[in-house]
Amino acid sequence: MKYGLFADVGSTFTKVVAVDLENAEIIGRAMSSTTIATDVNIGYDKAANAVMDMCGIKEFDLKLACSSAAGGLKMVAIGLVPELTSQAALLAVQNAGAKVLASYSFMLSKKEVNEIAGLLPDIILLSGGTNGGNSQVILHNAQALADCPVPLTVIVAGNKNATDECCEILEKAGKIAVPCDNVMPEFGVLDIQPAREQIRKVFLKQIIEAKGLDSLAKRVDGDIIPTPAAVLEAITLLSKGTDKTEGVGSFVAVDIGGATTDVYSATEGECLYQGATLKGLPHPKYKRSVEGDLGMRWSSPYILEMEGAEKLAKSAGVTEEEVATTIKKFNANPELLPENEIEQKVDVAVGKAATRISVKRHSGFITPVYTPLGERFMQEGKDLSAVKYIVGTGGIVISSPDYKEILAQAMYSEDDMYSLRPKNAEILLDKSYILSAMGLLSTQFPEIALEIMKKEIINRK
């Protein structure tokens, strides 16, 4: 096997990477606008043909693809207690590569069910109760979803004693019900891998066709998977390595896209401060979160709203009117790239805001608690303060000479002293935009994928 072709069909652009498998080298990459409104094969072929012309290769031994087109995989997470089963469901959804449309706790109200109907999620992950614990809430929520007036696919991953009854309730109402192991089988114990696998199966069976990707799926060798799931595979491999080759250890990766900003972390996330006590569930070592309101194009008006025109203008060194005009233009035409210095500056300012806010949300934090024995700390989420690297990817950091300035926003700041963001991490760049491609490659040839990532990301200066 000599050559591989790996495609990422994104919400805005389709990226294609060609790899020399024998020499573990990137030999070409190109991108084209994603043509989801007509036929994704058009954009794919344009990018693939450009890569073929670039490297002079017309036949590839391995072709794989991932996608986040048309919003990617969109899900709703439902649990019992916000800090426990709801959090477990949320982590399972995010680590499966889905965009979380909403998250709910306790018994669903009629208003919340109507909200879910309006969101039209691809999949709902229904959890609640440890095995042998509370079953009343998950049964109530199953009936509430059964009464929902729109078609639903529900993965039931809660108290195992109620799983069969929940599925029966849903199926009698014409919903698709998929039984799954509990995401929190015991109090404080997280087990999200079975839910991730069921989400993947449903994605392959139903979502590919719904997104219009079924024709492309017939042209590649393996299953089309969600792009974030592919990236998480790459992150996991780069961090821990293989049985033969050592990984690079702990790091954070920030993927700033047109619609969302995804953050990935690979670290144990142990308590930083002496005497600190972890509140809630321990987060997984390899974690992904997605911020649907933070993006360079589709979501830029939300960043403007959160940051304010004055703050963004100061960051960019332009006027507030120029910020508003540029964001309006990009939001209306997501495929556009900056055409002048003002637009470039605004793009950087938006990228900096997306990085800072997303990594802060992804990171854990500590809260001081005053006791008779003195000050102590409660920690929620992952401690990322000691990670070795911050890896940036996405169009804004790949194309901007100011990428270090953008990614530096992921670092700890004394203005936010209780946040557990990275403190002394080295900033690196996925310059060739290969993380999703390497995630795909890792499913077949992990040693080759690891070697390429080390050369292209870690050792590339």
Image (cartoon, rainbow, N blue to C red):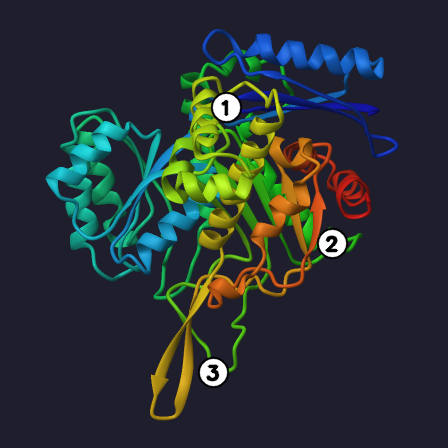
Say which amino acid is labelled 1.
Ser
Q: Secondary structure at mark 2?
A: loop
Location of residue 368 with respect to 296 vertically, above or below: below
Q: Which of the 4 image quadrants contains residue 266?
A: bottom right
- Viewed as shown, does residue 295 lie left or right of 244? left
Question: Circle 2 is placed at which residue position?
Answer: 247
The residue furthest right is 23
Frontmost residue, 333 versus 26: 333
Residue at image position (73%, 32%) is 432
- Viewed as shown, does residue 330 lie left or right of 107? right
Residue 234 visible to an observer of this rendering: no
Residue at image position (38%, 36%) is 302
Say which amino acid is labelled 3.
Gly
The residue furthest front is 319
Residue 345 place in picture, x, y as percent: 58, 34
Residue at image position (27%, 30%) is 119
Spatial CA distance of label 3 from label 1 is 45 Å
Question: Circle 3 is placed at which residue position?
Answer: 275
Location of residue 431 with respect to 191 vertically, above or below: above
Question: Circle 1 is placed at which residue position?
Answer: 11
Is label 2 in contact with label 3 (beta carbons under 8 Å)? no
Q: Which of the 4 image quadrants contains residue 377?
A: bottom left
Q: Secondary structure at mark 3?
A: loop
Q: Quadrant of the N terminus?
A: top right
